[in-house]
Image: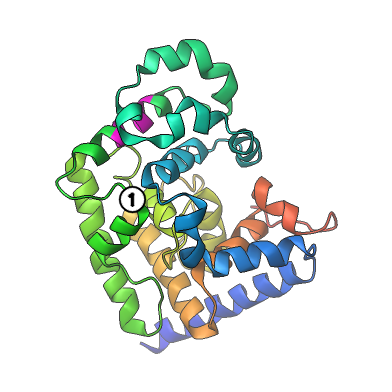
Amino acid sequence: MNFQHDLKTEIFAKFDAIRSYVDSFKLEPEFSKEFNARNNRYQNIVAEERNNLLRVMAKLTAYSNNAPSDAVKVMLEVNNFERIFHGFDLTRVAQIDPNFLVENEWDNIKVIRFKKKIVAIIRCASLLKCSNIDNSSIESFFKNYRIPTEIKILSDIDLFWNQFDLVLAEYIRLDMPYFKNITTLLHLLLYIGFPCVKPDLIVMKVAASTGIVKGKINHNTYNPKERKAVVKTIQEYCLLRGIKPAVMDLYLLIHGGQKDSLQYVNHRYVPFSI
């Protein structure tokens, strides 16, 4: 028991050091704007995404499979995705012929890397449209699954994972593309304002460097149990330090050198590497 306590104390001290190091290279006002946006994600996301869950799923699908985050961000800003997928109207997207988009629009969205993502987005629309429960809006997702939107006490972390498992089971049952996977589902929850992080390649590398999990040659091979352990440890750290996991996620991505996140630190910053 003391060993586990000492290990967490050591891990949390390393997280403190990561935050302190990043803070010494902050680029303002860019860093503070992103910090505040992540701090208030839950309150703002419904308006920002027009209460459209499919829009969020499509964006996160675009970013998945190590697509270049900076290039995907530019593509989204020029609204090619929005136009091609009809404003993410469920009925219209569910009726799209994926071959038509591949033949006529691929050059406009090829930064997403894989054409199979077009099929996946169309299938997400069909499944959301035909689901037994109304979960087509972001607000309905909050209502139906009752995942805590904040971690105020330790038991909230257990409640988070209990409810998370219900969502994951539902998406596995539906065979929901991408989001039946623990990492991508956590990315969805993070994006729409729930207290978690996405345990992707960068986060798992950093987690291994702090001792939460054992290091691996291929950091994409961590199993769901290991990824949950990382997210849960970060949730516990955030509860203890009084910060939100979405904010800690920003620090971890900067520390790990994610391209899009490096815009929030100055050119003298040297990311962590293995």
Outermost left residue: 132
Q: Nearer the viewer, residue 139 or 116?
A: 139
Which x, y percent locates residue 261?
67, 53
Residue lying farthest to the top in this orientation:
103
Q: Position of residue 6 (x, y in %)?
A: 48, 85
Query: Is residue 154 visible in the rendered structure shown here?
Result: yes
Tell me the quarter of the image containing the N terminus.
Answer: bottom left
Residue placed under numbered mark 1 in the picture: 137
Q: Is residue 112 above or below residue 128?
A: above
Color encoding of the figure: rainbow
Q: Main secondary structure of the magenta part?
A: helix
Vertical order, 86 against 56 (above or below): above
Query: 48 left or right of 55?
Result: right
In magenta, the rendered stretch is 119-125
Element class at badge 1: loop
Q: Nearer the viewer, residue 212 or 114?
A: 114
